Image (tube, grey):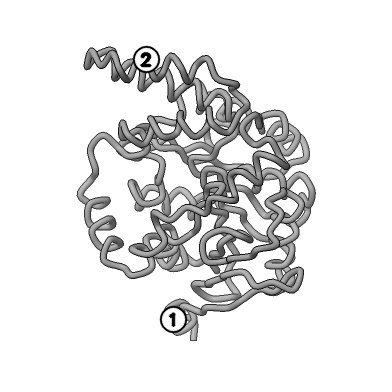
């Protein structure tokens, strides 16, 4: 029976506020639940869903994957794009699957929501796992600009250096500053590892063929970044003080970052390590921003070690 349940890919819809969310589950509902919180704002869970969800379930977890309200496969013209709304939808998942506790696996911007939810409902959180999580937005932007500036200086690319100079003069809390900075990170390959492992090459080759990945993995929902910026000022968020508060409340927190993730410096990872402890941090060589796919075996082994 467990083998059948583990192999079952069950597509369900979670109703909250009279709207539907795209939700997909993997594994045995009797196993420890893990809710994946995807990045963004404006992204979706498609790449994690296809590349990693079933493999995580095979480690003995009940994996719940969903797209946030108004993002990806959860279209909603009434979405407000607020933390309150996003946290209420996580509450909806708890109710739908009758969860008393769950692990929150927050990737990138999803890490912000994991921390926010645990701050609101610490008793409902078995643990938080931060995967390449955005915790200090302004420090991330500075890290990116420093790295791309170095790349352009090495190339003697005066035009691009001029653009960086213009970005540095922008309002650092503004959405344009955020967008242009991340755009240069993307153009210069800061999201991916310097060299893909053979394991990662196979994973990416397989997922590229998947119809879900083809349709959604590079799709961005334009309203979400604007909405979260207007309502939550996410471009100035610093979650480290909240992380310290959770540690004080004895919430279990773990983190996995890729050493080749150009969005975060060693200093940023060290700041997280100082708060949660070195035995609860995986800093994986050969992994970029999608650490769960770039070094999947190590990522899954870390989660099993920490959470089982």
- Disc 1 designates what residue? 3
Against 25, residue 34 (above or below) is above
Q: For this view, does 202 lie left or right of residue 162?
A: left
Q: For this view, does 92 lie left or right of residue 218?
A: right
Which mark sits nearer the N-terminus, 2 or 1? 1
Residue 116, label in figure: none
Across and down, in percent, residue 121 comes to 78, 52
Across and down, in percent, residue 54 comes to 42, 68
- Disc 2 designates what residue? 162
Q: For this view, does 258 lie left or right of residue 132?
A: left
Quarter of the figure with residue 211: bottom left
* Residue at (25, 52) in percent of width and height: 199
Across and down, in percent, residue 286 comes to 30, 38
Against 46, residue 276 (above or below) is above
Q: Which element type, helix, strand or loop, lies under badge 2?
A: helix
Distance, label 2 to label 1, CA atoms, is 58 Å
Label 1 environment density (alpha carbons within 10 Å; few <14, some 14–19, many ≥20): few
- Judged by depth in the image, the label closer to the viewer, 2 or 1, is 2
Across and down, in percent, residue 142 comes to 50, 20
* Residue at (69, 72) in percent of width and height: 19
* Residue at (57, 54) in percent of width and height: 37
Of 101 and 92, the residue lying toward us = 92
Against 77, residue 138 (above or below) is above
* Residue at (41, 34) in percent of width and height: 183
Q: For this view, does 225 lie left or right of residue 162?
A: right
Label 2 environment density (alpha carbons within 10 Å; few <14, some 14–19, many ≥20): few
Badge count = 2
Of 216 and 100, the residue lying toward us = 216
Quarter of the figure with residue 176: top right
């Amino acid at each position: 029976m467990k083998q059948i349940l583990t192999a079952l890919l069950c597509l369900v819809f979670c109703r909250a506020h009279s709207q539907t969310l795209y939700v997909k589950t993997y594994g045995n509902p009797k196993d420890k639940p893990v809710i994946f919180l995807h990045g963004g704002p404006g992204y979706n869970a498609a790449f994690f869903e296809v590349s990693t969800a079933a493999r995580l379930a095979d480690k003995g977890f009940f994996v719940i994957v969903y797209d946030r309200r108004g993002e990806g496969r959860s279209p909603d013209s009434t979405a407000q794009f607020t933390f309150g709304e996003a946290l209420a939808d996580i509450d909806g998942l708890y109710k739908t699957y009758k969860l008393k506790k769950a692990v929150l696996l927050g990737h990138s911007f999803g890490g912000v929501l994991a921390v926010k939810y645990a701050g609101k409902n610490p008793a409902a959180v078995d643990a938080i796992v931060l995967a390449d999580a955005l915790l200090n937005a302004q420090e991330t932007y500075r890290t990116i600009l420093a790295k791309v500036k170095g790349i352009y200086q090495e190339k003697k690319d005066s035009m691009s250096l001029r653009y960086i100079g213009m970005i540095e003069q922008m309002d650092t809390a503004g959405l344009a500053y955020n967008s242009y900075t991340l755009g240069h990170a993307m153009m210069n390959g800061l999201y991916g590892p310097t060299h893909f492992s053979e394991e990662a090459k196979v994973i990416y080759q397989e997922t590229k063929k998947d119809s879900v990945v083809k349709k959604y993995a590079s799709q961005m929902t334009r309203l979400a970044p604007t909405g979260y910026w207007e309502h939550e000022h996410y471009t100035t968020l610093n979650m480290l003080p909240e992380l310290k508060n959770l540690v004080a409340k004895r919430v279990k927190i773990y983190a996995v970052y890729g050493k080749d993730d150009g969005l975060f410096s060693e200093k940023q990872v060290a700041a997280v390590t100082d708060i949660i402890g070195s035995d609860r941090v995986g800093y994986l060589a050969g992994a970029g921003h999608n650490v769960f796919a770039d070094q999947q075996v190590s990522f899954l082994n870390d989660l099993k070690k920490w959470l089982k």
